[in-house]
Amino acid sequence: MPSPDEFEVERPHLLSVAYRMLGSRAEAEDAVQEAWLRYHRSRDTEEIRDLRGWLTTITGRICLDVLKSARVRREAYPGQWLPEPVVSFDDPAERVAQRQEVSLALLVVLEKLTPEQRVAVVLHDAFAVPFEEVADVLHTSVTAARQHASRGRKAIADGQARNTAGRTEQRKVLEAFLAAATSGDLHALAAVLAPDVVTVGDGGGVVNAGRNAIVGAAKVARFWAGVLARLARETDGVVTEPVLVNGDAGVLVTGRYADGRELLSVLSVAVADGRITALYNQLNPAKLGSVTDR
């Protein structure tokens, strides 16, 4: 008989699998709930020798279906799409969970893979699921499953922002960036930006975030100096609270107003060789719910 207690032990693992595949905490939670329902309805649970493996495979199948339908929705998404951020605070109680987070830099490039490539890469490379089982999830041959993973890895290697710095260095560079952007010092901004830096903003069609990514140190510097200058005019002050965003350095950007405060965005960075290689700015209110509810 299906055991709710045994399933709950596996729930964090399954959420991690589903979030890596879907980039949405809400969709990941729905996928895991569907996995529970399928487990609960199963009549041969006594024959399951590896419950984690069985549930991981089921979750993979569910996520594959979600990815195929989500691909159509996201093609019509207004502007740029970013995953829902996982925000945490750098205290001892959260450090174990933080080690399990997948960076936004990786999630962004995973979004560019086909559903089959994404499932193959996540299941095999991140969770060591054998290709025989990956093939079963994809309803294809083992050879084809390997090809999906190989093509996915190449796309990741070609497209992922360089993000080699540790958190301490990330934090130092991010603080220098914010100070320069706030003062409007374009020279100081350029000093902390990689030549091919990219900034991506997700407003969900609700908040103006620009329809296209901005690439290049000069353009990104002017853009962010303009953003901070506009916020200075439109608010009674801006507060940036240090946090971890998917395990990397980031800040909560909050505006002060006469009637209180409002979370405006969650900003995080990828850093390599002492310079920012990518900035991810989540402004979509629908994706900030888990932060505002804390």
Image (spheres, helix red, strand yellow):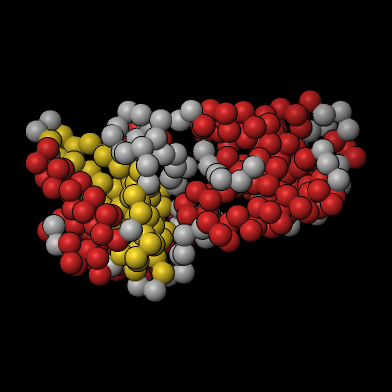
Which percent across, then down, holds residue 196? Answer: 38, 62
Which percent across, then down, holds residue 26? Answer: 52, 33
Taking depth in this image into account, of 169 and 16 the one nearest to the observer is: 169
The total of numbered circles placed on residues is 0
| Left/right of residue 10 with respect to residue 142 in the rendered view | left
Identify which residue is drawn at 34% across, 49% down.
214
Q: In this view, does 8 lie above or below 194?
A: above
Which percent across, then down, holds residue 52? Answer: 75, 47
Q: Is residue 251 above or below residue 29?
A: below
Q: Which quarter of the figure has residue 158?
A: bottom right
Which percent across, then down, holds residue 239? Answer: 19, 49
Quarter occupied by the C terminus: top left
Identify which residue is drawn at 44% across, 39% down.
81
Is residue 253 visible to the viewer in this orientation of the structure? Answer: yes
Identify which residue is drawn at 56% across, 45% down.
112
Is residue 98 visible to the viewer in this orientation of the structure? Answer: no
Identify which residue is drawn at 46% across, 64% down.
162
| Left/right of residue 144 with respect to residue 93 in the rendered view | right
Quarter occupied by the N terminus: top right
Q: Is residue 97 above or below residue 137?
A: below
Q: In this view, does 27 lie above or below 10?
A: above
